[in-house]
Image (cartoon, helix red, strand yellow):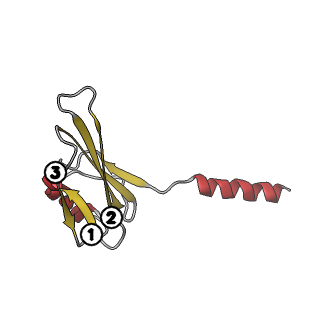
Amino acid sequence: MTKFIFYIIFFFNNISISQDFCEIKNILKENQKIEDCKKNDLIFGKLNFESENMNFEYKYNIKYNVKLIKNFYLPINNFILEYCNKTKDIKVKDITNLNKGGNLKFKTQVIVSCYFDHER
């Protein structure tokens, strides 16, 4: 019986340990140091901005199979080049909501997710 309980505890401990991840809250800042990120950790890069329009023009990056907001193509692409493992999945998601408290109508958050691959 104690062996059975030990296996259950061991099994649930392994499930509850999630994969490590890192986050860069503003990908527009250059030369950010990432201390705790190890190779192949999941990394999230974020970019927030406000706008009058919610219909953005996109530019497609064929090499990484992602579409990027045209006005922020360079910083997002640079983030991918600098931090992402190019052989694994790279995803870019933008979320636009009404801006209830700001000067402009809409606020957008762009989230880039990939696996960390950066030489220190």
User: Which quadrant would residue 74 be assigned to in this image?
Assistant: bottom left
Q: Residue at x 67, y 58 (%)?
A: 11
Name the residue beneath numbered marker 2: 90
The residue to which callout 3 is attached is: 30
Q: Does residue 73 sit above or below 106 in this rendering?
A: below
| Mark 1 Cα-neighbour bin, 10 Å: few <14, some 14–19, many ≥20 | some
Decide: few, some or many residues near mark 3? Use Cα within 10 Å; few <14, some 14-19, many ≥20. few
> Where does residue 29 sit, x and y in percent of width and height?
18, 47
Which is more toward the observer, 20 or 104? 104
- Label 2 sits on what residue type? Ile
Q: As rendered, which of 52 and 50 lies closer to the eye?
A: 52
Q: How many marks?
A: 3
Picture disc at residue 64? 1
At a point 55% along the width and 54% down the height, the residue shown is 17
Give the position of the C terminus as an image quadrant.
bottom left
The residues tagged by marks 1 and 3 sit, at their Cα atoms, a distance apart of: 22 Å
Which mark is on residue 52?
Answer: none
Badge 2: residue crowd in 10 Å (few <14, some 14–19, many ≥20): some
> Which of disc 3 and disc 1 is earlier in sequence?
3
Does dot 3 land on a helix, a strand or a loop? loop
Q: Are marks 2 and 1 in contact (CB under 8 Å)?
A: yes
Residue 79 visible within the image: no
- Which of the two discs, 1 and 3, sits closer to the camera? 1
Q: Amino acid at mark 3?
A: Glu
- Please, what is the three-letter code of the amino acid marked with disc 1? Tyr
Please report contact status of discs 1 and 3: CB closer than 8 Å, yes or no. no
Q: Secondary structure at mark 2?
A: loop
Residue shown at 33% from the left, 74% from the top:
87
* Residue 75: image location, x then y, percent: 17, 55
